[in-house]
Image: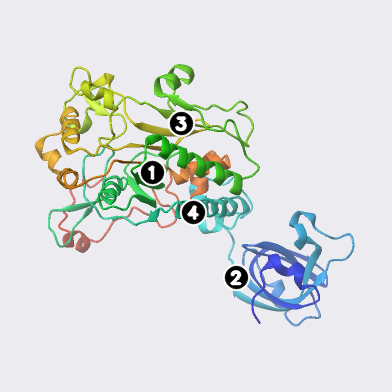
Amino acid sequence: MERTLIRDLVEKVDQEVLIKGWVDTIREHGSLIFIDLRDRFGKVQCVIHKSVSDFQKAKELSVESCIALKGKVQKRPSGTDNSELGEIGSVELSIEEIEIYSRANVLPFEVKRTDINEDLRLKYRYLDLRGEKLKKNIILRHKIINFIRNYLDKKEFLEIQTPILTKSSPEGARDYLVPSRVNPGKFYALPQSPQQYKQLLMVGGVERYFQIAPCFRDEDARADRCPGEFYQLDMEMSFMSQKEILDLTEDMMIKLVQEILPEKKFTQIPFPRLNYEEAMEKYGTDKPDIRVNKEDPNELGFCWVVNFPLFKEQKEEDYFHGSGERWGPSHHMFTMPKEEDVKYLNVEEAGKAKSYQHDLALNGFEVGGGSMRIYDAELQDKIFDLIGFTDIQKKEFAHMLEAFKLGVPPHGGIAPGIDRLVMVLLGEKSIREVIAFPKNRDAKDMTMGAPSEVEEKQLREVHIKLDLSKKE
């Protein structure tokens, strides 16, 4: 007999069915045992009478055991419907057979509880995922990503995967390094973003690219930032103006919310487009919260911030990669300056230059950032000089400068953060509530126990010798 999903039982009244899932609750009433069985799609009350041969099996069950039940679907007695279960609350399963796939031992915490120590929840994340709240968040995350893929496909974007093992280059955050076994003394880096690859795809004539891209940065945790890794909707477009990129992204966000989260309402459509200086003067931040009623969980205050400074003045301790130079990039080193401000690209006046950077803010969080890109090799080289790159550092980007001399189109892009966007859309306080297996505040994977020590043999194979004190 094929399995029937619990949500479909309403259509099977008076029929024999087979359902499978986890024991949600068990209640024994003399000659009857009631079992609420739960699968991903619903929950139903099931009942077995002591006259049934598998009655003893039911007595041996524990909560969260994984089982299969065979029996007849019947209407629940008048007045006993469970409205909390929706339509399924009007039926129950009269159990005829029980198959136990695996009995659950005593649980470290009740699946229904949410007031559990976070590290304990993360250690047993597979149990946490059975709870309604986290399950709902993960399902909505899937729907959001699926909507994005379908939307961009209709706009003739190509989804392309870029390398995970790539080259370390001075881009701002700390790299995660991966030693090479076959190239002694050399290292890959996990990508902080696919920035260079997506620009090279534009040189390759792709024109419209996107990727649900994993990004790796050795950064400290925050409520809105998961340390180590995160996912972004990476998009790059050729032959499009900044306005066209913003218009497309805004249209996608509006339609996404209207389809996936129709109960949400926008503070303003079209999204306001604020100059950086205006945002700082009015709100004191470049990620303003423009909502009228900040207590309304269904209000979404999207806005754009544009016309950022091209450079930020640095304190000595913040010099960009130790260059000792006064200026660092506000966004990143590939951001296009405004045409009228190219004249300011000198050490004395660089602070006057504005850029084609654009950030998308939502309810006081930055949920996406991007820019129009430099596509002129000489201009890119000039920017490298201003932020103090040495000749050795410039060589790290020789492949980009060479590509820019071989027919590169004007291009730009944006990369909304998937994790943070979902977090804000769902009104969660922590980004870990929308990620299946997040790292904790100390960048540890509590489920798998990572990071962990490795064997000496593994280190020798990749030509690494540890220099740690006994305490470390």
Q: Which residue is mark 1?
A: 227
Residue at 52% over, 27% down: 289
The residue lying at 46 percent from left, 31 percent from top is 304
Residue found 58% across the figure and 65% down from its top: 105
Helix, strand or loop at mark 3? strand
Q: In what element is the residue under mark 2?
A: loop
Rendered position, 337 above or below 74 = above
* Amino acid type shown at disc 3: Trp
**Residue 422: x and y, percent?**
51, 44
Q: Amino acid at mark 2?
A: Arg
Residue that carries the numbered disc 4 in the rendered image? 436
What colour scheme was applied to this rendering of the protein?
rainbow
Per the image, the residue denoted by label 2 is 103
- Crowding at label 1, few (<14), some or many (≥20) Cα neighbours within 10 Å? many
- Labels 3 & 1 near each other (Cβ < 8 A): no
Placement of 54 over or under 236, stated as above or below: below
Q: Is residue 46 visible?
A: no
Residue 259 x, y percent position in the rendering: 60, 48
**For discs 4 and 2, the disc positioned in front in the rendered view:** 4
| Separation (CA) of disc 3 from disc 4 | 30 Å
Residue 1 visible to an observer of this rendering: yes
Asked if labels 4 and 3 touch by Cβ distance under 8 angstroms, the answer is: no
Residue under pointer 3 = 304
Measured Cα–Cα span from mark 4 to mark 1: 14 Å
Say which amino acid is labelled 1: Pro
Q: Amino acid at mark 4?
A: Ala
Whole-percent x, y for residue 290 in the image: 54, 26
